[in-house]
């Protein structure tokens, strides 16, 4: 009895993809695209971190219309170490004649009996700065609000520019915020050792602020 021969399989047309190859290609392309995005984000953050560190090494101290001190923590009216360092640096600048007026900034946290601005005012007044040379801002909840409020205070008094005092890691973000709010400012960082954790936080803040704007970042 003759056995019927099995027909040969029909060959796939030239260039026709196998059914399983298309999902694999899509998956591979998606993985490559995701890797490229991660690489770009990592490069952006590393670059920003380097810029934060390098900016912290710069000191633009010069004559100005006012000295603006960024607030920091205070405890029942006693400035923290960070705030005291900034205030002492501002005091030395004022005594050296770099500016006739000092603006101190900063609100309070829930439970505080006073504000960063008032604690700073008391610190400087007790060290010989007359009240007429001190301007106080007591509502700012963050750096953006402190710089923005300082710009308004100085503009209302016809003061054209300022020396901004904070810690070195703050320099890059302060410059960006000053440009955004229209404050003509030079950075005069208080002497401070390198703070890796603070620099990492600043890297995140600067990276986000450059993309969405520092005002919007403050609102978040």
Image (spheres, rainbow, N blue to C red):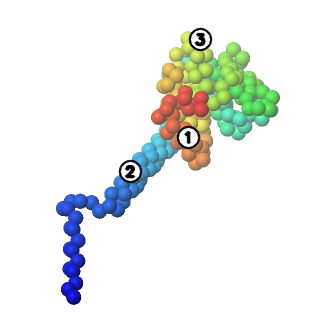
Instruction: Judge the density around disc 2: few (<14), some (14-19), many (≥20) Cα neighbours within 10 Å.
Output: few
Label 3: which secondary element: loop
Query: Which residue has dot 3 on it?
Result: 157
Instruction: Tell me if I can see residue 87 in this picture.
Output: yes
The residue depicted at 39 percent of the width and 52 percent of the height is 30
| Label number found at residue 33 | 2
**3D distance between C-alphas at marks 1 and 2:** 28 Å
* Camera-side residue of 115 and 130: 115
Instruction: Tell me if I can see residue 43 in this picture.
Output: no
Instruction: Judge the density around disc 1: few (<14), some (14-19), many (≥20) Cα neighbours within 10 Å.
Output: many
Give the position of the N terminus as an image quadrant.
bottom left
Q: Where is residue 198 in the image (x, y as percent from the top left)?
A: 60, 43
* Camera-side residue of 127 and 55: 55
Q: Which is more foreground, mark 1 or mark 2? A: 2
Q: In which quarter of the image is residue 31?
A: bottom left
**3D distance between C-alphas at marks 2 and 3:** 53 Å
Q: Position of residue 158 (x, y in %)?
A: 55, 11
Identify the residue at the far bottom of this view: 1
| Label number found at residue 75 | none
Query: Which residue has dot 1 on it?
Result: 202
Q: Which is more foreground, mark 2 or mark 3? A: 2
| Disc nearer the start of the sequence (1/2) | 2
Evaluate if marks 3 and 1 touch, with contact meaning CB atoms under 8 Å apart. Answer: no
Q: Is residue 120 above or below residue 19?
A: above
Give the position of the C terminus as an image quadrant.
top right
Evaluate if marks 2 and 3 touch, with contact meaning CB atoms under 8 Å apart. Answer: no
Q: Position of residue 89 (x, y in %)?
A: 63, 32
| Disc nearer the start of the sequence (3/1) | 3
Q: Position of residue 55 (x, y in %)?
A: 49, 38
* Camera-side residue of 195 and 180: 180
The residue depicted at 50 percent of the width and 20 percent of the height is 182
């Amino acid at each position: 009895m003759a056995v019927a021969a099995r027909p040969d399989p029909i060959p796939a047309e030239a260039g026709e993809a196998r059914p399983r190859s298309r999902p694999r290609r899509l998956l591979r392309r998606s993985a490559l695209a995701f890797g490229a995005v991660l690489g770009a984000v990592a490069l952006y953050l590393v670059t920003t971190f380097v810029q934060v560190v390098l900016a912290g090494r710069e000191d633009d101290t010069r004559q100005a219309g006012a000295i603006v001190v960024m607030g920091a923590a205070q405890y029942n009216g006693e400035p923290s170490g960070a705030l005291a360092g900034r205030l002492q640096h501002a005091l030395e600048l004022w005594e050296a004649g770099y500016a006739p007026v000092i603006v101190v900034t900063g609100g309070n946290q829930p439970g505080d009996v006073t504000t960063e601005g008032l604690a700073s005012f008391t610190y400087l007044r007790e060290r010989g700065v007359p009240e007429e040379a001190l301007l106080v801002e007591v509502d700012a909840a963050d750096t953006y609000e402190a710089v923005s409020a300082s710009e308004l205070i100085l503009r209302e008094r016809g003061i054209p520019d300022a020396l901004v005092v904070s810690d070195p890691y703050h320099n890059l973000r302060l410059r960006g915020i000053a440009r955004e709010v229209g404050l003509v400012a030079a950075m005069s960082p208080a002497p401070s050792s390198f703070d890796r954790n603070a620099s990492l936080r600043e890297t995140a803040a600067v990276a986000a602020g450059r993309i969405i704007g520092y005002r919007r970042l403050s609102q978040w």
